[in-house]
Image (spheres, coloured by chain):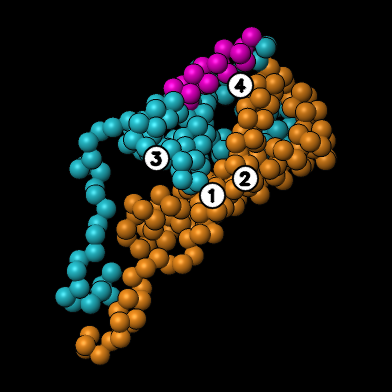
Chain colours: A cyan, B orange
Amino acid sequence: MAEASPGARARPLSPHLQVWRWHVTLAASILHRFTGMALYVGLLMLAGWALALASGAAAYDRYMGLLASIPGKIVLFCMTVALFFHLANGLRHLAWDVGKGFAPRTADVTAWAALVFGLVAAVVVWIVAPMSGGL
Amino acid sequence: MTGFRTPLGRARGLGSAKHGVGDFIGQRVSAVALLFLVAWGVWSAVILARGDYETARQWLATPVNAALASLLALAGFFHMQIGMRAIIEDYIGRPTSRTGLLILNAFVCWGGAALTVVCLLKVAVGGGAI
């Protein structure tokens, strides 16, 4: 940064968060990072599950009991929403990488689709799981 | 002093660092792998949620399940290390905090991946007994 020669034109800076008008594509972009950070914790919870399983039946029952408690279920449900949203929004990113989906209208629709999919898919999983005998 | 610098000398260091493409491709390839692994993982989680320790042990004794679970952990930790690294590099300016967090991120991700895979294999291959 300090290497630019004096007299050279100032290099452009990215607009700051505060100058953006709120929009669904903006929300999806921020939520992608936010859910990514949440899933960081989620994968560590999965590592905890593997550790509990390798530690024997007593540890496994204790860990599963923790996840099945009310706070545990709330966290797990939020993780499910985050997972499905991040997955759907990740598909948008993959489409952009091959040059598709940049039209404003398309970007709006896919952003909403990712948000709705995240919520609906999570709710469906949490309805289907107890019906199949889980939870 | 600047008058003596060549145009190339002035331009150097102003572009990209030239090694971001590895992360870029890695992030996308792991994302594609995770599309499938996560779908399988959610399905498996629903099955395992209804069972007890013995269910999980027998489930993991199936080679395909053990392999896919290990791949899910490896691809997941790989993907999340790159993602968190990008977030740290974007938002943390102070060199000491930045370096510290980047190292911590690497330790957490590599540690998590090693721990998970070893635990999975212990149950899958060793039968899970302590």
Q: Residues within 10 Å of mark 2 (few under 14, many from 20)?
A: many
Identify the residue under disc 1.
B27
For marks 1 and 2, give the one nearer the viewer: 1
Q: Mark 4 and mark 1, same subunit?
A: no
Residue at horizontal 49%, vertical 40%? Answer: A95
For marks 4 and 1, give the one nearer the viewer: 1
Q: Residues within 10 Å of mark 1 (few under 14, many from 20)?
A: some
Looking at the rendering, the stretch of residues picked out in magenta corresponds to A116-131
Question: Which quadrant is the N terminus of chain A positioned in?
Answer: bottom left
Judging from the image, what secondary structure is the residue with disc 3 in?
loop
What amino acid type should be assigned to the residue bearing mark 2?
A: Ala
Q: Mark 3 and mark 2, same subunit?
A: no
Identify the residue under disc 3.
A102
Per the model, the C-alpha gap separating discs 4 and 3 is 45 Å
Judging from the image, what secondary structure is the residue with disc 4 in?
helix
Could you say which quadrant of the image residue B62 lies in? top right
Per the model, the C-alpha gap separating discs 4 and 1 is 34 Å
Q: Does residue A43 appear in this view?
A: yes
**Subunit that carries the residue with mark 4:** A
**Subunit that carries the residue with mark 1:** B
Identify the residue under disc 4.
A65
Judging from the image, what secondary structure is the residue with disc 2 in?
helix
Please state if A65 lies on the left or on the right of A92 as rendered.
right
Depth check: give the residue in front, B91 or B100. B91
Q: Does residue A34 appear in this view?
A: no
What amino acid type should be assigned to the residue bearing mark 4?
A: Gly
Depth check: give the residue in front, B106 or A100. A100
Could you say which quadrant of the image residue B58 lies in? top right
Magenta stretch, main secondary structure, is helix
Question: Which quadrant is the C terminus of chain A positioned in?
Answer: top right
